[in-house]
Structure formats: C-alpha cells, structure tokens
Amino acid sequence: MYLRAIRALALLSLAITISACEMSRSGPTANEILAGSVQNGGSMHVVLVDDRVARAANRSDMLGFSRAFLNAGVASVGRINPGDLLTITIWENVENGLLVPLGANSTVLPSVQVDELGNIFVPYAGTISAAGRTPDELREVVTRELARQTPDPQVGVRREAGDGATVSVVGPVGGQGVYSLGNSNRRLTGMLASAGGVQSDPGVTQITVQRGDMTGRVWLEDLYSNSDNDIPLRAGDRIIVEENVRYFTALGASNKQAQVILGAREQSVVDGLAAIGGLNGQAANPSGLFILRTEPAEVANSILQRNDLTTPQRVAYVVDLTAPEGLFIAQEFLLRHRDSLFASEANFVTWGRFLDSLSAGVGALADVITIIEIVDQL
C-alpha cells in the first residue's frame, strides 16, 4: 500500500508538471517582461510612462528635403537635352534647293533626336552640337552651316519633349506615366497636378523624389502647407507617391492580433487600442500594457535621464491604464511605425489555466491509479 502511494504521488507530480508545461498563453507575463529588464540583467529598458517620458518619447515622423533639393534652383526648360526630339523646318530661296522638294518652298525634318552625346545630324549641315542650347541658338547654328551650301536659308527649330526632359510619376495619382518638363510643371506641385493629382488620403501620404543617388521625402500635407517643399524638378527625376505604409503590431490579450495601419500621422495608444477593438476584458491586465520599440541613442538618453548611451536601445514602455491618469497618458503617448503593442494577461488567467491543468492532471492520475489497481489484482 505504501509503495502504491509513493507511485501515485510521483505520477501526480509528473502529470501536473506535464500539464503545466503544456499550458497555452498569448505571450509573456508582465513579470517575465520585467525580469528581462536591464535592471535585472536583461537587454531592454523597462520604463513606466508618465508625462515626462511621453514628452521625451513622442517624435513625429518629420520628413523633408535636403539642402541639395531645396537650393537646386529652377531649371531652364528651354535648353535642349540629350534624348529630346526636335522638329526642324527649312526654307530655301531657290527653285531647285538642296532639301526643299521641287515646287515647294520649305521642308520639315520631323523627330530629329538629340543623341546621348548631345548632337544632331542635319543633311548638308553635318553633325551639330544641340544639347545645352536654346532652340533659337540652335537655329542660328543650323542656318549658318546651311548658308555654306544654299543662299540665304531660313530655319525654324521647335523643341519637343524627349527622354532627356521628362519626369516619371508613379503611385496613386490620376495618371501614372512619364511627363514632359515645361513651364507649368517645373516644380513638384505642378508635376503632381500634371499627373492628375494625388488620389490617396493626404493626411498619411508621402511624396518621394529620387534624383540620381539622392532621395528626398515629404508629407503631402507639408508639401502644400510649406512652399519651401515645392522643390524645382530636374530632367530624369522620379516622383513616387506612397500611400500609408506605416503600421504597428498588436499582440497578446487584445481583441485583435494583427498588423494595423497607423491611420494618422500622429496616433496615440488610445487610438491604437480603438483600432484593435480594445483589450480582452476576460484576459487582459490593464496595468501591464507594453509598447516595444528600439529607440535611437539620443531619445533613450532623454527618457532614461542619462547621457552615456551611444547606440540604439530596446525599450519596453509600460502604460498602466488603472492609474489615476493612465488613460490621459495613453492619449498622449504616440505610437510609431513598427511598434509592438503587447497586452499582458491578468494573473487570474494564468492561475485559471494552471487550475484547469491541475484538474486534468488529477483526472489523469485517477485513471492511472485505476490501472495500477487492476494490474495489482492480476
């Protein structure tokens, strides 16, 4: 009988241990996160959010163009560029001219393209450098060269758009495509208007301009509210209109676990909770709401009130919604792109799972004891 009791207790211990190991949960507990703090030898800083911390951590995603974009100056769209197409019209004052057909007084050389070296070819005038000249300047050169072959020629040059004087626009606009640079769209807003205007939410839309190895980005709202951002364009620029791509990830004991789009340039923790349907009232610990992010050194120094940090730091911000000013703090603390919003579980949920597992273990033990009794009787 004594041996049977020892065996039963051992089996009970094993059953409880196995059941406890198999308990499912939505993530680490608040205590487990706190145990991983720098203060406890871990690699992340755990910071309780108050008014000071909220002010130090809140940074709007400020975008803007560099001085290289802002100081570029308005380009002259009258200059001819490699890739441009030209229409050249020639009049001759003789009946049997070099280029003008018999019975006509002029001829047109359509779609004369400026090559990559900036040159064009005109019959009887030869290869002529065109890039960098205005149409009037090129007309004078062509006239001078033809005058060597025919008396008193008259020349007209009209510049049409080509690959060398265009800007491409992609994204949610009225019409994506390649647009010619002209007097009306030499600046960013004019080119967006040429493309039919932006078709996405202006509050969260970003405009990117790529120029060679330089890239600049600005919020659409800031483009129209600050004329300095209406930068001059250059041939070959790429304009990319981007819809909202910023998100946070909701995890743990919330009513929704997913990546959630940040619906505004500034979205608070309260806004984020509303977007996911709030916390799970049957499981969440309202005093243990965590915002996990990696902060630059300067922000981490400000938050932690120190000045020795030189590398990005992992920070777990804690918002206690049960505190007297908890909801106000949650209204003031802003979420940022790629934040993780983790709602820890209440302690009673963990205990409830443990008790369920214990009950299952005891039930399993009763079955084992029954089997032992049957075996003993054999």
Image: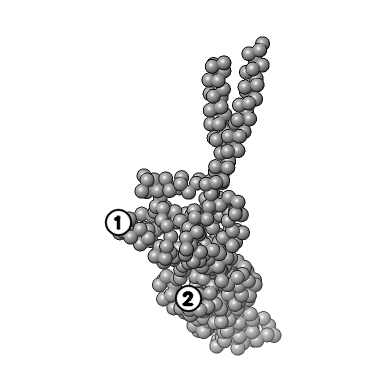
* 114 shown above or below 292: below
Horizontal side, residue 64 vs residue 368: left or right: left
- For residue 293, say whether it is visible: no
Whole-percent x, y for residue 61 in the image? 47, 66
Amino acid carrying mark 1 in the image? Asp
Task: State if disc 1 and disc 2 touch (CB < 8 Å).
Answer: no
Picture residue at 58% right of the left edge, 41% below the top: 353
- For residue 309, say whether it is visible: yes
Furthest-front residue in view?
1
Whole-percent x, y for residue 172 in the image? 62, 68
Amino acid carrying mark 2 in the image? Asn
Horizontal side, residue 309 vs residue 362: left or right: left
Mark 1 surroundings: few (<14), some (14-19) or many (≥20) residues within 10 A:
few
Please report whichever mark, 2 or 1, sits nearer to the chain's N-terminal start: 2
* Label placed on residue 308: 1
Whole-percent x, y for residue 44 in the image? 40, 50
Picture residue at 58% right of the left edge, 56% below the top: 279
Picture residue at 63% right of the left edge, 30% below the top: 363
Quadrant where the C terminus lies? top right
User: Between residues 347 and 216, which one lies in front from this camera angle?
Assistant: 347
Helix, strand, or loop for circle 1?
Answer: loop
- Residue linked to disc 2: 229
* 364 shown above or below 141: above
Picture residue at 54% right of the left edge, 72% below the top: 220
